[in-house]
Structure formats: structure tokens, C-alpha cells
Amino acid sequence: MPLDLETARAAVARYPSPRSALLTLLWQAQEADGWVTPQTVETVAELLGLTASDVESVLSFYSMYRRTPPATRRLQVCRSLACAMKGAEEILEHVRAETGVGPGETAPDGSFSVEVVECLAACDHAPSCLWNERMEGPLDKQGALARLRGQGGDPA
Amino acid sequence: MIRKLLTEGMDTHDLTRLDVYRGRGGYAALAKALGGMSPEDVFNEVKTSNLRGRGGAGAGAAFKWSTLPNDGRPRYLILNGDESEPGSFSGRMLIERNPHRIIEGALLAAYACGMAKTFVYLRGEFYEGYAILKRAVEMARDAGLVGERILGSGFSHEIVVHRGAGAYICGEETAIMESLEGKRGHPRTKPPFPTAAGLYGMPTVINNVETIANLPGIVENGGAWFAAIGPEKSPGTKICSVSGRVRRPGNYEIEMGTPLRELIEEHAGGLEPGHELQFILPAGASSALIQPKDLDVSLDFDSMMAIRSMLGSAGMLVCDERDCPVHVAYLGARFYHHESCGKCTPCREGTGWTEKVLYRMEHGQGRPGDTERLEQLCQGIGGRKCLCLLGDFSVTYLQSALRAFRDAFVAHEHGSCPMARQEVAIR
């Protein structure tokens, strides 16, 4: 389902300048399609009176927009100070050893992906993670594997 | 001591509900302001309160407001909820669990300064906080607390909740404006300062969400009441985020002036059993470390400065004897290299070189002279050479660690770690 034009125009109207809605429209599109498609870039550019390369230049700056379709289950592990101190990297190593999927990679069948992210402001639950975009923690080796194998709650 | 002004009722009540928040006295300050106080009256109460910014720098809130020019151009308020400093997580708690307090504070600031619109900038990772705050704004709008003619007065105001998309630099006050304008989050040159030429070139105030959440109490009880809490020059409370090697990590709202020792040993439960405090990063990855000998320091802006550290956002990362200062430096360097926006050369190149040197020191490949090399890098990056302070922040902890634990760095030059850490690190 592509970007809903009515919702998009309502977002644009909230700002003094249309371009301010750029990040918001990219979020809306990613929520609808799971990622930012090449078509989205064209549509958003047209809606805001920008060129596609304008949109690309902003899109490439922000780490949370996906440029490829997402895996079914998504684990993003924080590797910043508090979480690294509490073993985040050992968890990632364990996941790699058990599944062959390391940080930044997706399982060959597309069932899950593993990423590292910077501080999620959840250091009191270190090691913390985003599991299908939901903040969770503390994560451990078994919990990480169970989630990825589809035994740890339903993906959102 | 614990003193709950901003977090009062949060553990026992669902303050995200408008009826609950109002039932506990919420929006009374707004009603008081709109019912009989002029914008100048509200401004004067905030000035009397001596409220200082909770986001890091500790600048006077009223002073910042007072630098807005009186030239008839629209003024904007930006609430900084980007909270990306490793170790800080108090803003997220306020956003998720006391959103109306932030909205009420924003309305009071907007009334005092004659703001045209408020933008709340939340970091992209706050999926839940974004939904909660947006819903809270809608509830407030339905109740006549946001929008046209608020509470039947002549005051109208709109609040837009805006989401970033993954960039530490967007917590910087000029980068946040670029991002809000739909651009890459690159810092701007200063001057002009945001109050002179900010969002869309218009006068703009950027306040941290915790700073803003203090306003309802100040308006309701008076600036003098607030000024009398804690030390004269740093009045009020501070929500301290404690993480790392303590028994009870979490957020603790303390009266300013509380000893750091009390926060760590009493409220956070002390160190994990059988372990010993080695050092604390008191304001996230960007702050100079504090050693056990300074544990009796008072938690306020000036006392922390006096021991060459800072209160900042009060994201306290507690490290024990298992945490090698070199490893912590490597983790910080990796973070800053990843988050440098790439605009200014000292920061872009310097954070990369620092990470590279620390990586090899952490992986048994240190070279003779690496410690001095790091000291030279700190000189090259720090000292306000860039548009923003990210580069300076990236070396603050490192410099303090080089001063306090130089022997540990030198040991790493020869492939050994005094803490005998087992290295597992992913680049």
C-alpha cells in the first residue's frame, strides 16, 4: 500500500514550510510499505516541490529509513556504552555463531535481520534492543535466538 | 535526597490520561496564567525561579528567552526531545509517562514569549513516546487546551510533534532546526544564534523537555518557591539516569545539591555485589570521568564544573573494576565516529583516527607511542575548531581517562590490558 496522499497533505499543512514535512512523509511511506521505495521518492518529491535528488540527499543522511524491503522479524541491538559493557557484543557474536547471520545481515530466506544501533535511551535495561521496532531489554543470548527463530512473541 | 516535582505521581498513576493528570492538579498552572497573569508576569516568575537548562549547558531559561528580538516576526519554540547521549534516558521517561506536563510547560513558555508555534522534536527511535505524546496533544486539543482560544482566553497555540530518523547530531540546537526544515542534520554557524535567526530564519527558542516540564510548578507556586529549592545558583531538581554496574539502574529525581555518593550508594543501591567503583561518567559519553575520591561532590551545575566535570544531562554511567578505561574510550570513540555528521574536518577525520588507534589498542595491536598519539588527536579535535561541539565532546572523556589512567593506555601499547578483558568487539 503506497503513501496515502490525503494523510500526507494533512501533514504538510501542519508546517509553515512544505519541506519540513519531508521526514514525516518518509515515515508515513515506510510505515505503509515497510521501506522507502523508489516510487516513494518520486511521489514525495512531487508533493513537496522538490527534486528526487533533494529527497535522496536527505534520506541518505538518516539511518532509520530502509532502502530495501524489511525481513519478517527485525532485531536491532544497541552497542553503545552501557549495553556494550553488559554484553551486547557477546550476544551478537553468539547469534552469528548459531545462525550465520551477523550485524547488518539478513537470513537468506528473509525471515529475520540483525542490526546494531547506537544508544536507544534505555540504558537501565541494558543490553537493550528494538525488537520489531519495540523497545525491549535486558536481552540475553537465549532470548535473542528465540526471538529470531520465531519463538519469542509475534512480530508487530 | 529524592524530591519528586516532575515525576510526582508517575509511579502510581497513569498520567498519560488527561483526566488523571488534571485530577492531580494538572493544567492548573495554565489556567492560572491565562486567567489573570500577563505574559510578562509568567516571564518574571521564570526569571525569579533561576531555572537553568536541563539539556546540558545549564544556561538560564529566562535569559535565553530574554534575547528574543522584539521585531514583530513570528517566533518558534522547539522542544528538544532528541535525547541521544549514551547514558541519558530521563527525557524518554517524561515523554512516555508524563506527556501532559511537557505540553503544559510548552504552552506556558509559548504564552510568556508570544510563540507562533511549538515543535516537539523526538528522536526516531522513540516509537512509543511519539505515539503517546501525539495522542496526548490530541486529547488536550479536544479539551480546549491546545488550538484556538485556549480555555476561553485570547491565547491560541499549536503544538506539532515531529520525529527524527536516527542521527545523534540532531540533538544539537542548530542541526535540530535544519532537520525540522527537512534537510540533512548539519549544524549551522553561530552567530547568528537561534533566538536571533533560527527556524526558517525566525527568532527561535530551543529548550530541553525536562526544562519545560519545570514550568507548571514554577507558575503555580511562584518563582521564589522554586528558587528556594536546593543550591542558590542551581535550584530545583534533576532527574538523574543511573546505569552500568549498579544494583538498581533507573531514573532518580533528586534535589539539586544532593551528594553523588547518596545517589549511587543509596538510591541506585550501590555497586553490584562484590565489585568496586572505579569511575563514573556523570553526563553520558561526553563527560569527564569522576573518580571515587570525588564521590562526595554535590550534584549541581557549579560543583560539578569545579571538579572539571559536568552535570549536563546527568546520564550517570557507573563503571567498576571490570571496566577498562581504554575499552570505554574505544566504545565512545566508535560512537562519535559513527555519529559525526561529516561537515567539519577536525571532527570527521579526527573521530575516525581516534577510533582506529583505540581499536588496535583494544585488540592487542597497540603500538609504542599510541598514548601520545591519542593526546595529540585530542588537541587536534578539541578546542572549539568546529561548527558544533560534537568533536569537543568526543575527546572530553578520553582526555580525562588519559589523565587518570595513563598507565592503562600505555599497557595497551604493548598488547596487555590491566583489567584482562576478553576482547569481543564488532566494528
Image (cartoon, coloured by chain):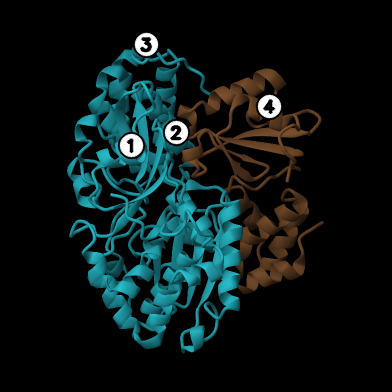
Chain colours: A brown, B cyan
Please name the residue that numbered disc 2 is placed on: A81
Q: Earlier in the sequence, mark 3 or mark 1?
A: 1
Secondary structure state at the residue bearing disc 3: loop
Q: Residues within 10 Å of mark 1 (few under 14, many from 20)?
A: many
The answer to whether the residues at label 4 and label 1 have Cβ atoms under 8 Å apart is no
Q: CA distance from mark 2 to mark 4?
A: 23 Å
Visible residue check, residue B182: no
Question: B29 or B399, which is in the foreground?
Answer: B29
Please name the residue that numbered disc 1 is placed on: B281
Q: CA distance from mark 1 to mark 2?
A: 10 Å
Foreground label between 4 and 1: 4
Q: Where is residue B183? Give x, y as percent.
A: 55, 58
The residue at 38%/81% (across/down) is B32
Secondary structure state at the residue bearing disc 4: helix
Q: Residues within 10 Å of mark 4 (few under 14, many from 20)?
A: some
**Which amino acid lies under the numbered mark 1 shown in the image of this protein?**
Leu
**Which amino acid lies under the numbered mark 2 shown in the image of this protein?**
Leu
Please name the residue that numbered disc 4 is placed on: A145
The residue at 62%/20% (across/down) is A94
Q: Is residue B215 above or below residue B270?
A: below
Q: Is residue A95 above or below residue B315?
A: above
Foreground label between 3 and 1: 1
Please name the residue that numbered disc 3 is placed on: B416
The answer to whether the residues at label 3 and label 1 have Cβ atoms under 8 Å apart is no
**Which amino acid lies under the numbered mark 4 shown in the image of this protein?**
Leu
Residue B211 in which image quadrant: bottom left
Query: Is residue B276 toward the left or the right of residue B426 in the image?
Result: left
Foreground label between 3 and 4: 4
Q: Residues within 10 Å of mark 2 (few under 14, many from 20)?
A: many
Q: CA distance from mark 4 to mark 1?
A: 32 Å
